[in-house]
Image (cartoon, rainbow, N blue to C red):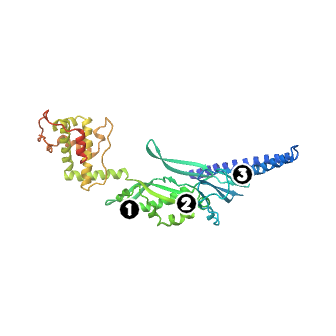
Amino acid sequence: MAEAKKETTEKLTVKQRYEQDLLIDVVAVLLSTLITVGLFYSPLGLLTKLSVFLLVVIFGYNKFSVVQESTAQNVEIFHGFWRSLIQFEGYTFDHVQQHPQKWNVIPGKEPWWHIGGLRWAGPRIITRITWYKFRWQDPQLVGGKEVIVPHEEVINYIPLRDEVYAPPTLVAAETQVEEEKANVDVDFREIARVSNPYLAQYRAPYNWLENVMSYLGTLYLKYVAKRTWADLSSRKGEDILDTLRTESFVSTKLPAWGIDLQQVTVQDVRLPKDFQDAQKAKALQRALAEGRAEELAGTVLAMLAKAHGQTVPEIQKEIGKGDTELKREYLGYFMDLFTREMAIRGKSFLDIRIPGRKNGASDDDLSSLERAALIYAATHDRIPQGKGGDSQPGGGEKKKAEDKKMTRDELAKILKGE
């Protein structure tokens, strides 16, 4: 029911546009007729009467339209297609061809003189410029970030230049992630243009762009299903149009609709959150089984002790006090090292680092891996020795003043493997 109501609203909106144009035509013709009749009873000279009559005939009984740059307009006569108007610098129609190929947009110049985008459309009342509702969405930069902006307008032109379109996100497309099947969300970007305005408006389905995106969405599902997560991720930003050309819809149907698909790229590939959480849990289990998490906790404690000029027990005590800066620093380094360790060992394909949380977060907010890291920080008693360090099981002496402290920058370099 909602869909039917939406369609009715759309038709009424377009209908109102036609009624508005028709009203303007009727008023112009009536005024022109009154002026013409009045000329017979006017005391004006013959030459003046002829001049006024010619102006009335040209502008009163004929419809003119201003065509925007890089667009075309379709003109109907008695509600049937008659001709197309074009304003596209450096391009024209292929007039030597027969209909409908004669409306193909090709490089060249218009064969007749014109002023800018002003075009003669035809006699008033019996001809009209076609209107339709056009819906699309495109990527735009807002505040330095890419945002998908939807548009919906009733327009009387067909865009001819290359445009970047953002089709709806492909949700829950099935692909292979290591040894498992998973549903991923994929964003694509399309660059397309209309190569024949007649075909796009009269041969393609109503709302041609939405229908093209809907058909392409089916092809995208097939494309994703044939590829693994790793393959999809490696193809971000690549043009996959050549692969899609093997499909009859792209190679045959789109040209028949007057649509020229220029480029299709994989913009982004995302795993659903529940799947990522499950993979994190598996990575944690592997790490705990291998004893790596405990070793990494000891490594981070030792480096923090050296960086802050304190003993390991002092660091452990400070971490145990609650939500302190040192605690957040410890967790950040631990998660970073854990991620790198898993990647090196080939046990995890995910970046499982946890973003920094706001002040006041409690242990209940922590992930299971972070909780394990805090447990090791409190109980671990076999700490790897740092260079020049003197930590021993169960504690150690405070560093002497003359010992050189490791700066935070040096610590960061170590963690980055530099």
Q: Earlier in the sequence, mark 2 or mark 1?
A: 1
At horizontal 48% and vertical 66% (from top left) the residue drawn is 247
What's the amino acid at mark 2?
Ile
At mark 3, the secondary structure is strand
Read off the residue under disc 2.
Answer: 259
Q: Tell me which label, 3 or 1, sits earlier in the chain.
A: 3
Q: In the visual, does 33 lie left or right of 411?
A: right
Q: Please tell me which of labels 3 and 2 falls first in the chain.
A: 3
Q: Which residue is mark 1?
A: 227
> CA separation, marks 3 and 1?
55 Å
Q: Nearer the viewer, mark 2 or mark 1?
A: 2
Tell me if label 3 and label 2 are in contact, CB under 8 Å. Answer: no
Res 63 label: 3
Viewer-proximal residue, 303 or 116? 116
In 3D space, how far apart are the residues under numbered discs 3 and 2 (Cα atoms)? 29 Å
Residue 317: which numbered mark, if any? none
- Determine whether label 3 and label 1 are within 8 Å by CB: no
Residue 216 image point, x, y percent: 49, 60
Q: Residues within 10 Å of mark 2 (few under 14, many from 20)?
A: many
Q: Position of residue 199 (x, y in %)?
A: 60, 61
Q: Identify which amino acid the numbered label 1 is placed on.
A: Arg
- Judge from the rendering whether residue 199 lies leftward or rightward of residue 283; answer left or right: right
Give percent across and percent down for residue 410: 22, 41
Q: Secondary structure at mark 2?
A: strand
Does residue 216 appear in the picture of this structure?
Answer: yes
Crowd around label 1: few <14 · some 14–19 · many ≥20 (10 Å): some
**Do the CB atoms of the residues marked 2 and 1 lie less than 8 Å apart?**
no
Q: Amino acid at mark 3?
A: Lys
